[in-house]
Amino acid sequence: MNARLAFPTAPVLVTAYGLIRLADGLDGERGPGPAWTAGHLAFLGAMVLFVPVLLVLRRLAGGGRLATAIAAVGLAGAGLSMAQITIDVVVGLRAADHAAMGPMFDRVGEVPGVTLAVYDAGPSLFYVGLLAAAVHLAARRAAPVWVPFAILLASLASAVNLDLLPAAGLLMLSAFAPLIRPASAAVPREAGPRHPRHARGRRPESGVSMARRPPSAGG
């Protein structure tokens, strides 16, 4: 999937996960079962697609050291989120019922550093990186000034209550909307040689190339 499709698809999958999660909890319990697995796989797909999104945001911001550092933070968070989701899927597939899931998660949490890296601080890096990338783009006038605010609201919604994930996904989708067209042009193609216009009866100077490259997306 190219980056232009990743921009709308990733937030849509976040919203899908949020809706499936809400439906899964209607009986008072979440997991195990098809809804638990399907929802988490949708969220896993979203995180996978956020990888090219973060890389394109880096290019749109000019690809400098700051943009690279921001992308690295976001990618680290996305990777840790994928680890968390994978654990959740495996537990859901192995557990016979909801009561059996608790002890399994407890055993995972007993591994030193896993709770902090995979469940607490780690995934937050994704939202920090995504928000920082949006702020950086807005500061460079490569994105509307409201885009970081939409990302901030999406991040806060996810942090306050996972039941707000459908809204968080829609906020991300709105924030990415003005970036979809620049994303398709993030890697400019080489322009072919252009023949200059010249006065009748005159010949262009030999040895001077008139071909021009299109400006990079980062400016």
Image (cartoon, rainbow, N blue to C red):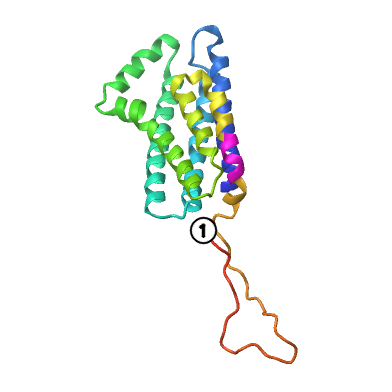
Seen from the viewer's position, the closer of residues 10 and 199 is 199
Per the picture, the main secondary structure of the magenta-coloured stretch is helix
Residue at 43% in and 40% down: 132
Q: Is residue 34 visible?
A: no
Residue 18 is situated, as x and y percent measured from the top left of the image, at 54, 23
| Farthest-out residue, right | 200
Query: Would residue 209 be found to the left or right of residue 139 on screen?
Result: right
Which amino acid does the dot numbered 1 rest on? Gly
Classify mark 1: residues with Cα within 10 Å, few (<14), some (14-19) or many (20+): few
Q: Is residue 194 visible?
A: yes
Q: Position of residue 102 (x, y in %)?
A: 37, 13
- Range drawn in magenta: 173-179
Q: Which residue is mark 1?
A: 219
Query: In terms of image quadrants, where is residue 214?
Result: bottom right
Report whether 197 appears left or right of 179: right
Residue 207 location (% of width, % of height) = 56, 87
Residue drawn at (45%, 20%), measured in percent from left and top? 160
Quick check: is 85 in the magenta stretch?
no
Relative depth, front residue between 168 and 14: 168
Q: Secondary structure at mark 1?
A: loop
Please tell me which residue lies in front, 112 or 78: 78
